[in-house]
Image: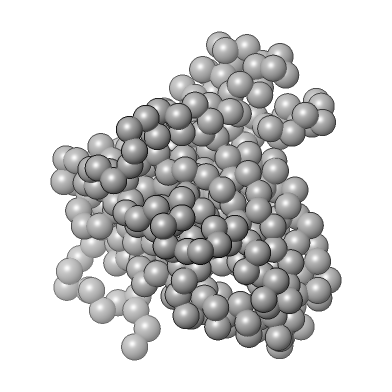
């Protein structure tokens, strides 16, 4: 964590921790509901990657737009989407952000600047490219962020989008969430050069690697590139290094992971690090535990609210859709 944060840093870190715990506890509740088969279908959780979402969103303003992968619960919550509305979507309720039509992997929430997930690897990057082109053509100062996993770095559409964004000098930031696994395969076994941020050189744009378990480090890096993009200086590639603490998808046994890897990852994951940093700043364990208890209750109430809401009416399945 940053060592120069001072009193302002203590306040900021408490907010980071609260936001990261909200995401973590949401995902843990989703796991519980999925295990009970109350939530059905494909579910991809983001436990361990929370600092990327919280730090990146802290660098943006309300007019900016964000596009994620199918692992988007954390991004949506970081954008301010209410947990109850997000639970409602995953549970197929009318109170969901897409009236229960999108589910876990394909919802969007434009009212909060979250322009949605995409279940095709890397496909959301090209959609975000269109949003950035639109912003430039309209003379807007908004910045677009597109997030994707490191496996998507090998998709043709991602390369084409980076090249086009660079050539057109678009306000588009590419955020690569590098959790070191491309689905079930170690990424290092798939590429000759594992410093993925260096690919930015080929497009003539800035590229940087950041500690994706440190929300303040992510915010600082993102803030610089957001300011540059808003000033018309074009795109950048940010590779945020992290580890997911769960499988690629719900039900993934993770038999491909080396013995002890998860144990080590849990020692340096974002919430553990944030709590330690705050204790070093003088925050008591009791105060930190009280914050966690408050968020636990918030998530439980949100889930109860969603579970009590009516299911989406299958007879109206074509409503709320574009044709």
Residue pictured at 35% horizontal, 55% vertical: 185
323 is higher (above) or lower (below) than 281: below
Residue pictured at 81% horizontal, 74% vertical: 233
Residue pictured at 59% horizontal, 58% vertical: 195
Residue pictured at 51% horizontal, 64% vertical: 192
9 is higher (above) or lower (below) than 152: above
Image quarter hosting the C terminus: bottom left
- Residue 4, position as x, y percentages in the image: 82, 31
- Whether residue 205 is visible here, answered yes or no, is yes
Is 55 placed left or right of 193 in the picture?
A: right
- Whether residue 88 is visible here, answered yes or no, is no
Q: In front: 77, or 264?
A: 264
Is 190 placed left or right of 126 in the picture?
A: left
Residue 235 placement: quadrant: bottom right
- Residue 17, position as x, y percentages in the image: 58, 32
Is 78 placed left or right of 322 in the picture?
A: right
- Residue 257, position as x, y percentages in the image: 33, 42
225 is higher (above) or lower (below) than 293: below
- Residue 194, position as x, y percentages in the image: 54, 58
301 is higher (above) or lower (below) than 142: above
């Amino acid at each position: 964590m940053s060592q120069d944060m001072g009193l302002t840093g203590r306040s900021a870190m408490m907010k980071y921790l609260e936001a990261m715990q909200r995401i973590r506890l949401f995902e843990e509740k989703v796991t519980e509901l999925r295990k009970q088969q109350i939530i059905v279908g494909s579910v991809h959780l983001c436990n361990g990657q929370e600092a990327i979402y919280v730090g990146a969103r802290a660098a943006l303003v309300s007019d900016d737009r964000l596009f994620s992968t199918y692992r988007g619960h954390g991004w949506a919550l970081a954008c301010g989407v209410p947990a109850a509305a997000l639970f409602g979507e995953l549970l197929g309720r009318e109170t969901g952000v897409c009236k229960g039509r999108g589910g876990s992997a394909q919802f969007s929430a434009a009212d909060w600047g979250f322009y949605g997930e995409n279940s095709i690897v890397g496909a959301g990057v090209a959609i975000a490219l269109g949003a950035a082109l639109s912003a430039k053509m309209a003379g807007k100062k908004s910045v677009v962020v597109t997030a994707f996993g490191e496996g998507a770095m090998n998709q043709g559409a991602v390369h084409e989008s980076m090249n086009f964004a660079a050539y057109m000098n678009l306000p588009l930031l590419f955020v690569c969430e590098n959790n070191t696994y491309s689905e079930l395969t170690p990424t290092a076994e798939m590429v000759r050069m594992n410093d993925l941020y260096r690919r930015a050189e080929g497009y003539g744009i800035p590229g940087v690697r950041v500690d994706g378990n440190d929300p303040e480090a992510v915010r600082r890096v993102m803030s610089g590139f957001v300011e540059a993009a808003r000033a018309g200086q074009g795109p950048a590639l940010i590779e945020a290094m992290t580890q997911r603490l769960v499988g690629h998808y719900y039900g993934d046994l993770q038999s491909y992971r080396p013995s002890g890897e998860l144990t080590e990852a849990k020692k340096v994951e974002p919430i553990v690090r944030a709590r330690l940093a705050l204790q070093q700043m003088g925050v008591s364990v009791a105060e930190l535990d009280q914050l966690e208890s408050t968020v636990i209750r918030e998530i439980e109430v949100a889930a109860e609210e969603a579970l009590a809401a009516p299911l989406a009416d299958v007879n109206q399945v074509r409503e709320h859709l574009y044709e």
